[in-house]
Structure formats: structure tokens, C-alpha cells
Image: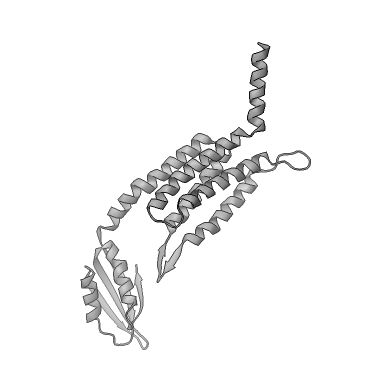
Amino acid sequence: MMLAQLSAVTAQDLFVGLRLDLALKLGLAVLMGGAIGMERQIAGKPAGLRTNILICLGSALMMDLSIHLTGADGRVGDPARLAAQVITGIGFLGAGTIMQAKGTITGLTSAATIWAVAAIGLTIGADYYVEGLGAGAMVLLVLLVLGNLEHKLVRTRRTAPLTLRTAVKADFAPMEQLFHDCGLKVTEKQVFDHPRDRVFELRLRGPSPQFEVARELLLERPDVLDVTLH
């Protein structure tokens, strides 16, 4: 009986002394960050496998540190303070993945994924293992399943207004041909002449991805000053 109690105490002391609980947290953080990062890596995104692992691992470590950190007087500090700093820092990192080219924004999903991975790491670091694993599974579900659904929705046809600002007295015929070549049809057109430019208020119909393709091609023309999709 005494031997069994001594063995139990020794095992508990060993668990606490070696911080096996921290090893479990970091291992789960690597697992969740790696699973999400692998999906991002396969999709060819800038924030891939190693990035998401490091974010989740670092967040879990900082959360564990904030929970167990004590001051000089022995009192435990506020765990929310370090967690708040992690969230702020992730905001800057996420902003770095967002790129803009001729008005087209890319990288928003990568930035949101980084933010979610950091939240998973903080959750695991705070000893909420089931919640962290569940959130990681849901993030993977969103990225894997809803990504395909989003792609199908993007391929659908739609009608949208477009404002085309051109040089004075610009000819619309070649621009209309450009729309036609992109698979878009001009269903409505209004022309407004100003001293410094000519503005075409259009309504187009066609496949959703072709709107951005047509916009990029229009901006390459020297007589086009600006293109705004509404």
C-alpha cells in the first residue's frame, strides 16, 4: 500500500518536474498547426506548414507561460495580458500576408487562418484541449470543404455594375470587344462626358472570375484611367 502511494507520488512529481503537461500542449499545437499548415502548403499559400506550426506552437507556449508566470511576491499575474499581446502581434503578421495589386486584394484567407491558428494555440495552452482540437478540426473543415464550394460559387454567372473612367472622347468599341472576348456582355450603358475624362456606367453579365480578368486588361490600356467594380 505504502509502495503504491509512493509510486503515485513519484510519478506525479516526475510529471510536474519534467513539465510533461507542457510537452502535451506543444505536441497538440504542432499537430493542429501542422494539419492546417499542410492544407495551406498544398494550396500553395504563402503561410504554409512551418509558419502555421510555429504560430500555434508559440501561442501555446506563451499562454502556458502567462498562466504559470509569477511575480516577485509569488502572486500569479493576469493570464490575459500575454494572450492579448499574442493576438496583437498576430495582427501584424497577418497583415503581411495580405497583398494588393491594381486594387485586387489577396491573402485574406491566409491572414484569417493565421489568426485562427494563434487562437487554437492559446486555447491549448490554457488547458482546453478538447476545445482546441475541436476548433482545429472546424478550421480544417472550412478550408477543405468550403474552399471547393466557394470555388463553385465563384464560377457562377452574375450581373454587376462597373464604372469605367477613360480619356476624353475615348472610343468604347474596342473596350466592348474586350468584354466580349472575356465572355462578358454589356447589358446597359450610360456615357458621361466631362472636361477631363469620359465616364461609362455599365452593367455587365457573365462568369464571376471574368470580371477581374476584364478589369486587369482594361487597366493595361493607355486610354483607361480607372475601373471600379461595384
Q: Is residue 166 left or right of residue 129?
A: left
Q: Is there any visible trace of residue 187 in the rendered image?
A: no
Q: Position of residue 87 (x, y in %)?
A: 56, 51
From the viewer's side, name the closer residue of 190 and 227.
Answer: 227
Residue located at (41% from left, 56% from top): 45
Q: Is residue 36 left or right of residue 176?
A: right
* Image quarter (top left, top right, bottom left or bottom right) of the N terminus: top right
Q: Is residue 146 left or right of residue 35?
A: left
| Coloring basis for residues | one colour
Reply above or below: 20 against 49: above
Quadrant position of residue 214 = bottom left
Q: Position of residue 32 (x, y in %)?
A: 47, 42
Q: Position of residue 46 (x, y in %)?
A: 44, 58
Farthest residue in the right direction? 73
The count of marks equals 0
Quadrant position of residue 65 = top right
